[in-house]
Amino acid sequence: MDETFRISGIEVRLTPTGEVWFQDRLLGRVGREERFGQWFWRAYDAETGEAVKRFLTSRPEAIQLLLLRSDLIDGIGF
């Protein structure tokens, strides 16, 4: 079942596979990865599937990064 999140005032939909959607637009994907004995969140580009940035501490931060890359927000507050 999809989840709805409000990040930086923008409502996005998160699918069980980690896809992040804004309205009918796929922004990318978020996922967890274990590194050095700790879990981190990563954001992945919608077109290439490549990781955008490593080692984000929360899922909202990873979603915020996708919003920034999609020009839906002007900056990130972390």
Image (cartoon, rainbow, N blue to C red):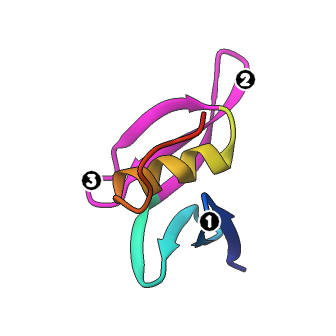
Label 3 amino acid? Thr
Residue occupying the far bottom of the picture:
24
Residue linked to disc 2: 38
Q: Quadrant of the C terminus?
A: top right
Q: Residues within 10 Å of mark 1 (few under 14, many from 20)?
A: few
Label 2 amino acid? Gln
Q: Are marks 3 and 2 in contact (CB under 8 Å)?
A: no
**Residue 22 lies within the magenta run:** no
Q: Residues within 10 Å of mark 3 (few under 14, many from 20)?
A: few
- Give whichever of 55, 36 is nearer the camera: 55
The location of residue 18, given as percent across then percent down, is 58, 61
The residue positioned 49% from the left and 30% from the top of the image is 54
- Give whichever of 27, 49 is nearer the camera: 27
The residue positioned 46% from the left and 44% from the top of the image is 75
Question: Measured along the vertical axis of the image, is residue 18 above or below residue 42?
Answer: below
Range of residues picked out in magenta: 29-56
Q: Are marks 1 and 3 in contact (CB under 8 Å)?
A: no
Residue linked to disc 3: 48
